[in-house]
Every structure is written in structure tokens, then in C-alpha cells.
Amino acid sequence: MTEEKYRAAPYLAAVADTAPGERNVGFDKVQAYLERFGYLRESIVREVGVLDDPTEGALRKYQEFFELPITGIFDDATRESMMRPRCGLPDPQAGELAFATTCAWTDRTLTYAFDTGTDDVAGNAEFDAVRRAIQTWQNVGGLTFTEVALGSSPDIRIGWRPAADPDHSMVGGVLAHADFPPGCSVVTNTLPKPVHFDDSETVWSVGAAANAFDIETVALHEFGHIVGLAHSSVPNAVMAPTVASNFTKRALTQDDTDGFRSLYPAAPQAWSGWNSLGGSLTSNITVGTNADGRMEIFARGTDRAVWHRWQTAPSNGWSGWNSLGGVITSDISVASNRDGRMEIFARGTDNALWHRWQTAPSNGWSGWNSLGGVITSDISVASNRDGRMEIFARGTDNALWHRWQTAPNSGWSGWNSLGGVITGPAASGRNADGRLEVFARGTDGAVWHRWQTAPGSGWSGWHSLGGVITSEIAVGNNADGRMEIFARGTDNALWHMWQTAPSTGWSGWQSLGGILTSNIAVGSKAAGRLEVFVRGTANALWHMWQTAPSTGWSGWQSLGGILTSNITVGNNADGRLEVFVRGTDNALWHMWQTAPSTGWSGWQSLGGILTADGALGRNKTGRLEVFVRGTDNALWHMWQTAPSTGWSGWQSLGGILTADGALGRNKTGRLEVFVRGTDNALWHMWQTAPSNGWSGWQSLGGILTSDVALGRNKTGRLEVFVRGTDNALWH
Ligand SMILES: [Zn+2]
Ligand SMILES: [Zn+2]
């Protein structure tokens, strides 16, 4: 971390430590500070210069928001914190959400204009810095900003002003101020809304400079207020109230975009088709998020090393594959340190836990280090409310073991047992009040859980949530803070259970139907609605979603594809979900929500939305069966339920077709279909018995440049014909 020399509010340095009931010279200035930033209401009667009861209550709230020891005493830590340069707007009460929001603009198309600049930087560099900060918020999606002339009635007016600013004083330690949208304003009830920088007490810079403040960094924070965000208690967030000199923070964190999304939910969005990210993978896929919002994916290669690739910009394209080395024997787990550095965990060939971490946020990686232990499961990572990571794994005694960071971003405790006899990896979640909770399957097949009795503190005993589950447990957090867990039942359907209120008791199990052939992945960012992804029959990807935040569920819908792994869900910085799977070719495939506009409807029946002519076959029993490529490029089929009579509904056979398929009948009467995949290889799938069920997709390899043609030999053997890259006919 940068050593911060700059001190604001220097008058606080002279105020002595003050305990409850004490009076000290200058303590009235501490009370004024607490009132100025929203901790001590002006109307509250207090004894000036004395740390009385109302002042102690305010001081404790301040210490809680800044995650200081909550002593109720004006002490060194509190004085140091209050002397940090900061924004002029008040802090909200520490609530359940790290970010806090005020209200949103009803008009989503805003205008801004520049007033007076500063002489601290050359030319109009200060305006360009503000324009970049505005663009960063606009990139999240949901609000647009257009620059206009000062005389064109802008919604926002940006300028450098004296510290004794008439609309909101910035005298003493305040760098800048803005205001919230109309309807929740604290500075002015009229337009334009101010974004004002202190030009008399503060030195401004473009980039990090000693004793100066980066304009883009502060502008990004102030425009967070303009869009409707209040201060966040997450120290790493752009919306944290304080900022250092000689420092830049020009990218939004997850906390900031979460806050933005809660004000401006993304519209229900459509999905792209499948795209290959290549590679040859031998594990499930793991997704992490860099401090700057770029997703990064991890998987084990054929060499059993960890390989990764990352978005080159938030919500954008991907780097190539790179190896992080090691020889691992589990899936990879990833979590972010409080300061934004990602850290990955996996089991080594010695069955110990190994990890490596980014040496700086969004940056390079340490070497592998062992955390010891002898573990017999994948690893679950959770973040305590104070940012300390905590990891959970099963030991050789089948009990749940854990270890935790002893301080945020710092070293680790030894292994400790949480007891129990569990039959799979643990799943962990965090309650709305900050308490971690772990879930695991017991020897009776039921879900068992235990929880921290206070945030970051000791643990309850094991308790059963009942049920008989046949998958790992997935945990989601509803928009209102209630946890919800998902697992596959003995009927292979998806079952779920939820907290009936944040941080409190649980509903019973309920079925969401479906036929699952994988574990469950849960995404939760898009518009605050949970969305679950599973592999269904025929190895296709299926999903369902809450129809409104924290409420009911859609039916199952297919996203096609041919999956050979569990599903992983990533969150783009702009709120779009993206899913990752391993295909039958062992390559990584992904698909993502496209820009807002189209709804989710459309894919429960085919309803005549075909992208190719169908193929028609006749089963051995005489029943017709039709095959078409759907708009999802998956192969869909329906069949007569008896010869010459009614038809079944459409069902997906998955797959990713780039051309019309060819259909043949084997000598034994089994139908067989052939298609070109997006990898241009020849793929096929066949009935496992005449007139009966279907195999999964299998690749026959090759590189095709044509549709597939099919013949039948005299002996009854099928023969396929295609054009290769050499334009020759291949069969
Ligand atoms: Zn602020
Ligand atoms: Zn002002």
C-alpha cells in the first residue's frame, strides 16, 4: 500500500485521546466532524467538547463504518482515519450491503458541462480526466452522458471552486463534493447537479504525484454520487469515502458495479451462441474477477498444470492460454483478497493444499506455496465480512477442516477441524449480517450446515437441513440478502431451499423439476435475479431464472451445447452473465448474454423458428421422426408417438450445428445423424437401440467445408461424404 503522508483536518492532531465522559480541548471539532459526515444528527442535543452518550454512539458508528476497533473512544486509530482526505458528502449508516444507494435518475440520458477548471494541470487536461471517469460509469451500461455547452441547461455542472464553496463547504480535509440524483439530493433540489473540486486547499494532478490528487480518481468517485451511490464501507471500492494522495484508482470494483446494477438493473438479456476458447482441459472450469472487473478463467490442462486466460479489458475479448504450472489433483478454487488480488487454491499430488496469488491487483502471480494438510475433496473459499478469506476442505477423517487468513490480505492460521462426517466438498456462503455458513452432505445424504455465531467468530454445531441429495451443494444470495441452496435430488431433479428472512431460518425443500446430469452453477448479478445452470440429458446446457429479484422461477430452457463438465458462471463487469463449459472436444466453450433488447422468451417450443430444412426419418417401427437445427444451433427432434398418429413435443439433442445434418438408418434400424460442428469436425449421434433413445454427440474429427451427404452401402453400412479443406471429396 502507498504510504500516505498527506494529512487533512490537521486541527484534529492536537485533540488528545478522549474517553466516554471526558472533556478535552478541541473535542468539539471531533463532534463537528461527526455531524458534518452524517454520524451525529444536528438535532441531537450534546454537551459541546465532551464525549457524552450521543457522541459515543456516533463515534462507534464511525468506527464500525471504517472497520476500526469499536472502542467508543477518540483514540489513535480514529484520529488517523479522520485525518485522511475525503469526499464532502456524508456516509450512510453501515447496513447489510457494503455499497449503499440513494435513488436513480428517471431520465437515463444525462448531459454535463464544464465550468471553471484548475491551473494545477496544463491545458484542459482536467476536463479530459473527468470525461474518462464519466465514460467508465457509462461503460457499465444503463446511463448515457453527453457533453453540452454551459448555456444549454446541463443536468450536471463540473467545476473547480474555492474551499469555502457556497453550496457545500469543502474547508478542511474535503477534496470534492457532488450531489445525488433529484429526489434524494442533499446539496440542491434544482438542476444542474454540482461536481465541485476544491481548488484552494488541494493540489490536483493527472496521475499519481506527491501530495497531489489524481483528478480522474476523484471524479470517478464523485460521479458515483451523481449516478446515485452513497459511500461504501468496502475500503477497496471507488465509493469508499477517503482517498490517498499520490494514488490512482480509475476502475470500478465489483462493489461499485453491484451498487450501480441495483439502481439500474440490466434488462433481461439474450445469449450468444457457443464459442470455443480452445485448450485441452481435464477439470471443471473456475472463474474469478480481477479488481478492475476483468474475468479470468482457470482449468487444469492435460499436463495437470493450472492454465488460465483472461479478458483483455472488462466485458471484452480474451487473452491466449497461459500456464501457471503446478501438478494438481482437484478442481481449482478462486477468491479475491480484500485488496482485490485474486488467489487460487488446488490440491497437489501430495494431497496438501497449494495456493498462489496475484502480487498486485489485476497483476502477475506469486509462485506455488503449500498450505499443508491432507485433503480429500475440492476446496471451498469464502470471504469473511472483514475481507479475510477462509477455506474449507474434507480431511482424511472425512471431517470438515478449515483455515483462515489471520488478517485481510495476510497470512494463514493452521488447519482446524469443524468435525462431522461429510461425503463431499463443502459449499460456503455469507449471511446478510456477515456470518459465514457452510453446507455439506452427510452420510445420510442430507444437507448439514453450521454457521459462525457472529461475523468472523466461532461456529455453531452441525445441524441437518434434511433431504437426500445426489450432487454437490450450490449456494446463491438473493437480492434481499437471503441465502438459497440448490442440489440434485434422488429423482435427478433440481431441489432448492431458502432462508425465509435474511440471516435466519430455512424453508423446506422444494423441487424445480428438470433432469440434471451435473452439479449446479448459480449466477446472481443480472438484475438481482438468481439464475441456475445445469447439464441436462443429451449433455445440453439448461437454465432457469427468477422472474423477479428474490422471487418465483421460470421453467427450464435449453441453451444447447455439448457439455462434458460441470458449468461455471462468470459475471461481466457490465452485469452480463457468461457461462463456461468443457465440450466433447475438451476445449473450453462459452456463451454470454448479449446487449439488452431481446427478452428471454422463445425457446420452449420451436414454434416454427427453424434455421434449416428439417430431415425426416422413419423409425423401424414405422414412426416418423423429424430433425431440425434450432435457432440455438442445437439439434432438435420430435417424433410420432405411434405410427401415423400424434407427435411428441420438441426435445433438444444439444450440439452446435453449422450446417444441415444428414440422417441415415443403420442396418439394424437405428437412426443416425451426422452434422458439421462449429469446429468444422464431423459429429454424429445415434439411437442406442432401434426406435429408441439417443447416444450423446461424438466427434469423428476432420475439417469439413461442406454439408454432409450420406449414402448406404449394399451391405447396409452407412457412408458419409464431405468436402475437406483441400476441396477434395472425403469419406
Ligand atoms: Zn463521496
Ligand atoms: Zn459545491
Image: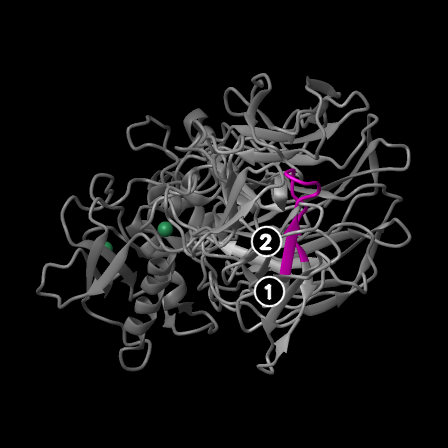
Q: Earlier in the sequence, mark 2 or mark 1?
A: 1
Is 94 or 268 nearer to us in this picture? Answer: 268
- Kind of residue sitting beneath label 1: Leu
Question: Does the closest atom of ligand 1 sit within 8 Å of the Cβ of label 1?
Answer: no
User: Which residue was labeled with disc 2?
Assistant: 580
- Quarter residue 3 falls in: bottom right
User: Which residue was labeled with disc 1?
Assistant: 277
Is 355 or 6 nearer to us in this picture? Answer: 355
- What's the distance in space between the residues labelled 2 and 1, CA to CA? 9 Å
Q: Which residues are magenta?
A: 683-698
Is 92 or 198 nearer to us in this picture? Answer: 92
Q: Is residue 105 above or below residue 117?
A: above
Q: Quadrant of ligand 2?
A: bottom left
Q: Position of residue 730 (x, y in %)?
A: 64, 74
Q: Quadrant of the C terminus?
A: bottom right
- Kind of residue sitting beneath label 2: Phe
Side of 431 relative to 602 (left or right): right
Q: Position of residue 305 (x, y in %)?
A: 78, 63
Q: Which mark is residue 20?
A: none
